[in-house]
Image (cartoon, rainbow, N blue to C red):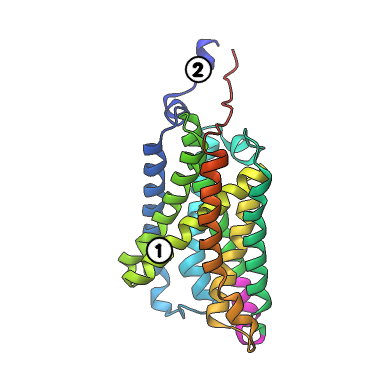
Amino acid sequence: MHEHDAPSPWKSFWERGGWWKALLLVLLYYGVYQLGGVLLNLIFGPAKIEPGGALGIFVGVGLPILLGCVLLVVLAWSVGWLKELFGHQAIRGRGWMWVAVAVVLITNVLRFVALDYESAGAALILSWMLTGLFVGFAEEVLTRGFVVQLMRKAGHPEIAVALVSAALFAMLHAGNFFNGQGALTTIVQVGYTFFFGLLMYLAYRVTGRLIVPILLHASTDPSIFLLTTHPAAGSLAPIAGLGNIIVILVGLVLMLVLIINGGKDRAIPRMAAN
């Protein structure tokens, strides 16, 4: 490698990986998200936008996360990781990991089927779908993209990659406690998001493409929040409402299977060109 081809200190910092860099990046992302929310509240607050309405969801939830999407793409570009993040990953999945994809897909479909679309209205549904796309992209690029790459570059086994990725994803949602959410609700949410994050890791692992957990995640948040506020009459809505419990139970089982059958797997590091 010629001297002028040597990576910059910025790129070298990220290429060496490490769990603490993953933690640092997640904390920085959370800080940017909170700051974006404060700034948008200052800008749009006087307009008294209805928090649960279509515009309120897009402005209050979607726009701060869209800012995070942009910054994550810029970071990936600055360190030369765009192809590495969105290309095919360096480790194969195992057949049983398809269960993670199936469970999330089925629970999301059930929730969408159980919605009262007339009550929700087209504007709110479209707002949540667009916001969900932002959420899926930002949180998956952050925790299944950057965090996974940083852990793998440091040489950690896949069980550590999976658990740290899921734990940092859950940590993002623990911050809701400081935004006024009740302690019990936050504890339940952290447990759910940990196992959901584990399923997203397995979906990424078995398909080899980050776009899969992005799309699965993008359809999860809208289906949960819309079903909570606009369930259709009948017996299907209560059944669909059990989706989070199913994710927790299946996630727990698959975590044990991962530990037993694939805990020592390691990604093949990419070698730098001479």
Using the image as rendered, state which of residue 90 and residue 135 is in the foreground.
Answer: 90
Q: Secondary structure at mark 1?
A: helix
For mark 1, what is the residue? 37
Q: For the N terminus, which image quadrant?
A: top right
| Prevailing secondary structure of the magenta residues | helix
Residue 125 shown in magenta: yes
Q: Name the residue at 47% across, 62% down.
A: 192
Disc 1 to disc 2, how far (Cα)? 39 Å
Residue 237 visible somewhere in the drawing: yes
Which of these two is toward me, 211 or 163? 163
Q: Is residue 266 left or right of residue 27?
A: right
Residue 73 appears in the figure:
no
Residue position for label 2: 6
Q: Residue 216: horizontal and vertical position, in percent?
A: 63, 58
Q: Amino acid at mark 1?
A: Gly
Rendering quarter of residue 103: bottom right
Task: Establish if 203 lies above or below 230.
Answer: above
- Residue 237 coordinates in the image, percent (x, y): 61, 81
The magenta segment:
118-127
Q: Residues within 10 Å of mark 2 (few under 14, many from 20)?
A: few
What crowding class fits label 1: few (fewer than 14 Cα within 10 Å), some (14-19), or many (20 or more)? many
The disc, 1 or 2, on the residue closer to the chain's N-terminal end is 2
Q: Which of the image's four quarters has the C terminus?
A: top right
Q: Is 242 in front, or is 229?
A: 242
